[in-house]
Image (tube, helix red, strand yellow):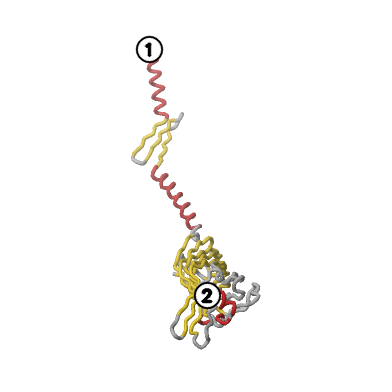
Amino acid sequence: MKKLVILCIMACISASVIAQRNVRIGNMEIIVRQQEKDTTLQNNNLDSSHQQSNESENNSYTKSKAKNTYRYNNTSGLLGFGVILQDNGIGFFPDRENGYYEILGGNSINIDCGTMSRQQLTRWFALVGTLNYSFYNYKLYDAYKDPVFIEKVLRNTVYDADILDKHVYRSHNVAVGAYARFYLAKPKRHDNDGVFIDLGIQGDAGFSRYCKIKTQLGEKQFFRNDYAFNPYTASYIARVGLGSFSVFARYRFTDTFNPKSLPVDLPRLTVGVSFHD
């Protein structure tokens, strides 16, 4: 009786083993299943399954990367040169009540030198930021004749026009700008800016501001008055560019001189060109 029971148990175990058997050879797995009438054979290639999974992931990554190729950052050097023009309140901003001192336009200049950073958001739009040193040189024509200027800036020093050689106001600044860039022709690669229009604002913080007078005798005098010269100015800027070259117009909407000290201000409009690598 015991032998019969043992034989039955062994038969059940054998049937279970025969019903499904997995055999692995290298990267190939063979599954043998015993059914009521037939025996089925299944071949699983592990390398093929793994390869298909990797290809699917790579295709997904490639599509995602291709979709976002227009999103990138670009930083470059910036160099600009502009000429300050004599204006009398042109534009959309109210004039100063007493107007502006006359300047010599060809000798009144602006120089910018610094960095430009561009955050490309879409193929047709980007945000641009600038950080640069900004220098303004106003060659004054008749300010030395103004009684208020003589009192507030020149410390009651009177100069004869026959001996006066140079009369300038200079401002050295740290400037920060922020712009929205719209493309007329989208850039084709990271170092190509395409054709674009920038609209933005720039703020200047002056760290050195003074009036300089030079006579024909070689004498030089520097006049500083922190109360008369505003330390901060702000301007609207429009820039039209092609690649690394652009033309800009800057309109200062704040006063260079403190109106409580000097009722007459300096011209506001600057036009020029800029380059970035």
In the rendered image, residue 210, in percent from the top left (x then y), is placed at: 50, 73
Residue farthest toward the front in the current orientation of the protein: 156
**Residue 167 in view in this figure:** yes
Q: Earlier in the sequence, mark 1 or mark 2?
A: 1
Looking at the image, is 268 positioned above or below residue 181? below
Q: Of the residues shown, which amino acid type is indicated by label 1?
A: Lys
Q: So how many labels did they put on this image?
A: 2
SS under mark 1: helix
In the rendered image, residue 169, in percent from the top left (x then y), is placed at: 51, 76
Check disc 1 and report the residue beneath it.
2
In front here: 224 or 14?
Answer: 224
In the rendered image, residue 16, in percent from the top left (x then y), is placed at: 41, 26
Tell me how far mark 1 sits from mark 2, CA to CA.
105 Å
Check disc 2 and report the residue beneath it.
247
In the rendered image, residue 73, in percent from the top left (x then y), is placed at: 47, 61
Looking at the image, is 115 positioned above or below residue 88? above
Q: Name the residue located 47 percent from the left edge and 56 percent from the top edge.
A: 65
Q: Quadrant location of the C terminus? A: bottom left
In front here: 223 or 139?
Answer: 223
Can you tell which of label 1 and label 2 is closer to the viewer?
Answer: 2
Residue farthest toward the left in the current orientation of the protein: 26
In front here: 28 or 167?
Answer: 167
Q: Quadrant of residue 178?
A: bottom right
Q: Quadrant of residue 84?
A: bottom right
Check residue 256 in the rendering and tell me which mark sits there, or answer none: none
SS under mark 2: strand
Q: Residues within 10 Å of mark 2 (few under 14, many from 20)?
A: some
**Residue 273 in view in this figure:** no
Residue farthest toward the top in the current orientation of the protein: 1
Q: Of the residues shown, which amino acid type is indicated by label 2?
A: Val
